[in-house]
Amino acid sequence: MFVCHGNICRSPMAEFVMKELVRQRGIDNIYIESSATSREEIGCAIYPPAAQVLAAHGIGSRGHRARQITVEDYNSFDLVVVMEDYNIRNLLRIIGCDCDTKVWKLLDFVQETPTRWMGDDISDPWYHGGFDRTYSEILRGCEALLRFLGY
């Protein structure tokens, strides 16, 4: 489960990038979704500039609707991968605690020795407008996550 604040930019970008990487490698045993820590954008489609960057890389995002993560999601997924420190704080308010040590930041996995919550944040294009930059960070993190998982 990929998580960001509103589930309209970074986490759906990560969801669809990861789905494409998994498809390209013929991996069929990874289930991928995304969600938000906030309720602000529930029901909204992926933000158009995010969808455009994905499309420029041959990645579709049709059908996405923002939703908030739940305790049930935390219990169901093996990993909950957030985009930044702020997401960790908000996620912990929803789930209570990361008692099963499932919560990681996406860029934790690019470190030589992945360490929870020590990686850089994925930059938020909502504020800086650099959707290409965010795409590159997400792609780097997703590729590293697949290596971490043994693919």
Image (cartoon, grey):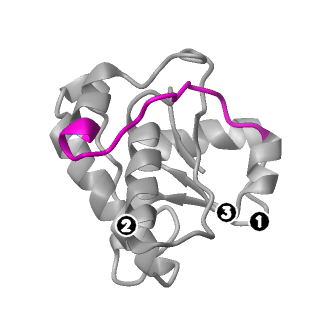
Residue 23 lies left or right of residue 125; in this view the side is right
Mark 1 is on which residue type? Asp
Q: Which residue is drawn at 49% across and 61% down?
A: 117
Q: Which residue is drawn at 71% across and 57% down?
A: 77
Seen from the viewer's position, the closer of residues 144 and 16 is 16
On the image, the x and y values in percent for residue 26 come to 46, 72
Q: Distance from label 3 to label 2 (Cα)?
A: 26 Å
Query: Which numbered tag is attached to residue 100?
Result: 1
Q: How crowded is mark 1: few (under 14 residues within 10 Å), some or many (20 or more)?
A: few
Residue 53 lies left or right of residue 94; in this view the side is left
Q: Is mark 1 on a helix, strand or loop?
A: loop
Q: What element carries label 2?
A: helix
Seen from the viewer's position, the closer of residues 139 and 87 is 139
Closer mark to the observer between disc 1 and disc 2: 2
Which of the 4 image quarters holds residue 128?
Answer: top left
| Residue at mark 2 | 24
Residue 83 appears anywhere in the view: no
Query: Which numbered tag is attached to residue 102?
Result: 3
SS majority, magenta: loop
Q: Distance from label 1 to label 3 (Cα)?
A: 5 Å
Q: Residues within 10 Å of mark 3 (few under 14, many from 20)?
A: some
- Residues shaded magenta: 54-70
Q: Earlier in the sequence, mark 3 or mark 2?
A: 2
Above or below for 133 versus 80: above
Q: Is mark 3 on a helix, strand or loop?
A: loop
